[in-house]
Image (cartoon, helix red, strand yellow):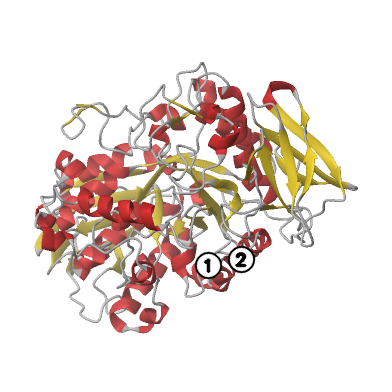
Amino acid sequence: MSDPRRHATLGARPEATGTHFRVWAPGHESVELLVDSETGPAASVPLTALPDGYFGKTVAGVRAGDRYRYAVDGHGPYPDPASRFQPAGVHGPSEVVDPTAFAWSDAPWRGVPLESLVIYELHVGTFTPEGTFRGVIERLPYLRDLGVTAIELMPVADFPGTRNWGYDGVALFAPARCYGTPDDLRALVDAAHRTGLALLLDVVYNHVGPDGAYLFSFSPWYFTDRHPSPWGKSVNLDGPHSTHVRAFLIENALHWIGEYHIDGLRLDATHAMQDDGPRHFLAELAERVHAATPDRHAVVIAEDHRNLARMVMPMAGGGWGLDGVWSDDFHHQVRRALAGDSDGYYADYSASTRDIATTITQGWFYTGQLSTYLGAPRGTVPTGVPPQRFVVCLQNHDQIGNRALGGRLNHEIEPAALRSATVLLLTLPQTPLLFMGQEWAASTPFLYFTDHHTELGRLVTEGRRREFEGFAAFSEPAACALIPDPQALTTFEGSTLQWHEREEARHAGMLRLHQALLRLRREDPALRGADAGTFRAQALDDDTLVLIRWSESAMLAVVVRLRGAGRADLGSVAELAPRTGHGAWRIVLTSEASAFTDDPAPPEVELSGWSPLIHFRRAGAVILARTAPE
């Protein structure tokens, strides 16, 4: 790969004789560089005023490892808004980092194409007991053997304190020092590539955290009152000086792609990134990321509940050119069907097998219908959008951690139903996402945790409990008091995965099911294709649906019983009608096999006729296969 600094204009950039510093501080008269000294007062160097509100200078003698801050019109000192490392925390000095010093070994790496992505989302601090980038490295062989193809790290931009989900990040260019050094993160990416895994990074461009956000000290133009935002002022993408704000964020994206060899970005809450300008910021960002990676696959995926097809349509057709978008409708439909959730946005979903089948077929459910929850129409018709551009899941950090008790789906439903839904998820043509520990039905919750200063922490704790007062289960003060305190160390520690669980029978079977399904997804030709004309989902009854996947040489019928005992007759499925040259049906997998549960209840499968009959004893799934005519 080429020089990682080729897109860098901001921050501290080591050169042959010193370090070049550049910062945006429009409307200010002066910016001074303060270089820390162990023996005396910090050395002060005035930066040169440059056009468009920038200040910069090459300072001789400053090297990688030196620490520095800025004074703006005599105020401060402040860390660098584009700091590459904050070793003493987000309020301390920034450190000069040389991104060219790391010895990469991934020159042959070309990434993982979109159609092959199986994403594993993890939080660095709670994924392993070490809670570090190096700790994740030790688990890479396990993830490869599980069968996922990409790791997605929750945000790592540095935040106040020593524990956080990452969405309170304020040093957007600096990996969180509690996880390790910048080179530790590079080592993780390099090791992932050697293992055959892509590494994606969750980034937050819609807001900054409430503590340590020194962007305000350099310019008020980073944010604007033009658009409402749940986090206060919105990021300024279309107002005065927005050209430079957009450049700052795009440089951040290219910094992760270039200086860390990251394989793609998941953009947090893009519905909150409002832009009324002639070209939406997300389209510009996607184009720049793709242009910077001509020799490898790099994806840009949005988290966005609006169901806007243009986000993932090609730029040539008027789209924004993103590679994918989280499709929440699948999660919400299945969650309501299995766990019965009906509060909040779940009220918009029937959870009928017919609606689940529609969601699978379209990629999302809402295509312009009225949303009762929003009180307005939601969504657009995604005609022509390839299935792999929809990222779907049964669980993710939000859908677990935003519950009062951080409960996973396996904490609330029967194991048989969870196995059945897992078969459905991992045979879909869409891009599946797993959340860490999901593959063995981890017993640990994933709770909301923070480490703010005392006063802010008190407000966060009170706000967290107030958030759930409208839920029936927490309407009484005594019940509300049981919600774990985000500030407590035990809340963080209780969210750390317990890896020994994988060896226990009730967890080991679930792990084997995931491994078997991901191997099938990788090897079976009917599951490798993801064109719109190679799959169909259909409800068989109120509790059962079938997903048909086919290729030129093979056909699979994935029969999923979500609830209770019952009989599934596939005679109504047109694609399964006998045709000359078709082979006989055979059983590929059943979720109720003894390999996957210590309490097996395999369904009875009749394959004597052309139309298979399946008698389920409880929730379960069966995958049938036959060869296609030559």
Say which residue appears at 13% left-offset and 62% top-offset.
479
Secondary structure under tag 1 reads helix
Give the spatial CA distance, label 2 vs label 1: 7 Å
- Percent across and percent down for residue 536 are 29, 43
Question: Which residue of the protein is positioned furthest toward the top in this rendering?
Answer: 278
- Going from the N terminus, do you reach mark 2 or mark 1 first? 1
86 left or right of 283 in image: right
Q: Which quadrant holds residue 230?
A: top left
Q: Residue at x 50, y 69 (%)?
A: 131
What number is the disc on residue 195?
2
Residue 3 showing in the rendered view: no
Label 2, residues with CA under 10 Å away: few <14, some 14-19, many ≥20:
some
Q: Residue 110: image x %, image y %?
A: 66, 51
Mark 1 surroundings within 10 Å by alpha-carbon count, few (fewer than 14), some (14 through 19), many (20 or more): some
SS state under label 2: helix
Residue at 25% x, 26% y is: 368
Residue 144's label in the rendered image is 1
- The foreground one among 273 and 346 is 273
Residue type at mark 1 is Arg
Q: Which residue is drawn at 18% across and 68% down?
A: 414
- Marks 2 and 1 in Cβ contact (< 8 Å): yes
Is residue 517 in sight in this rendering?
yes
Residue 522 in the image: x percent, y percent? 47, 59
